[in-house]
Each structure stands twice: as C-alpha cells, then as structure tokens.
Image (cartoon, rainbow, N blue to C red):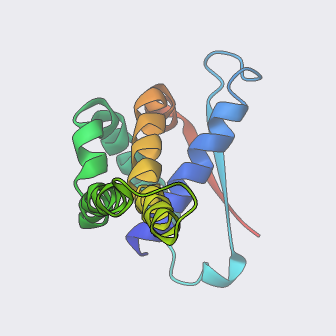
Amino acid sequence: MRETTVQVTRERIVDAWSELAWKRSPGSARLDLVLPAAERAGADEAEIIGAVRADMRTMRVDARHHWFRRALRPRESRIGIVIFFLALGAGAVIDFGESEGSLSTLLAQTFVVLAWVALWAPAYRLLTAASFRLGRRYFAELAEAEITVRWD
C-alpha cells in the first residue's frame, strides 16, 4: 500500500474515532475495519490488525515529537516558502513608487497572489501535523482498542 493511501486511511480512522469519542463509554474501545471483499484473497487478518496497531503506536509517539519541523521538512513545503518570499519581494520591487491603478500595480498584485498560493501546501502540512499532535490521545486509544476485520 502506498504511503499516500496509508495517510488518507489513517486520517479517516482517526477522524471517525474522534467524532465518536463522546459517545463511547470508557473501556469500550472497539474498531471495526470494513475492507473490500475483492481484496480478501491472500489477506491475513492478524497481520492487518497487527499493522494497524503498530501504525497507531508509531503515530502516538511521532505525533508527540518534532511535529512542527516534520511539517516543514518535505521539499514541497520548503519550495513553497521560498517562492512565497521571492514572489512577495518581486511584487514589492515592481510596485515600489508606482501610482495606484497602473499596470505595474496589477503585476505586483499577481505576484502577491502567487505568493499566497505557494503557501497552500506548507499550510496544509502544518495544519495536518497540528491535528495529529492534538489527536495523539486517539492514536493511543486506537493502538489499544479491540480491532476486528469485516469483509464487505
């Protein structure tokens, strides 16, 4: 399974778990994984359960440490931040001393919009990292929950 699929699946599990947190009574932690029946051939349920537990334990520890730095580590985030500052600088240089409503002002504002668009990916990563940091309790609960696999 690709890392992107694992991350999306992890987010869906934690989101659903957090939404139901207030409905669960203490000690009744149970997670039902509903997987496609077409993928059942050759699948080992114990291995799937073990992988989910191991992933949740890892995320519990990872969410506690270095979440801010990890969000800014990917090359896409670093490039976005560099483009943000370059585009803002270019817009400021182009617009410096120009009259309002000129073509230079329009071009400068285009660079400002480009700068903010460049921050979308880093901002998404930072918000996701913060969400995981705040949800580390759910990772701990999921790591200890009773897990069952159902094929649908």
10 over 6 or under it: above or below = above
Count of numbered labels shown in the rendering? 0
> Residue 26: image x %, image y %?
64, 15
Nearer to the camera, 30 or 120 = 120
Pick the quarter of the image with the C terminus: bottom right
Q: Is residue 86 left or right of residue 7?
A: left
Q: Is residue 95 left or right of residue 45?
A: left
44 over 142 or under it: above or below = below
> Residue 144: image x %, image y %?
47, 32
Dividing the picture into quadrants, the one containing residue 29 is top right
* Residue 46 in sight: no
Q: Residue at x 55, y 50 (%)?
A: 11
Nearer to the camera, 132 or 74 = 74
* Residue 72 in sight: yes
> Residue 49: image x %, image y %?
48, 54
> Residue 101: image x %, image y %?
58, 60
Q: Is residue 13 left or right of residue 95?
A: right
Nearer to the camera, 39 or 93 = 93
Pick the quarter of the image with the N terminus: bottom left
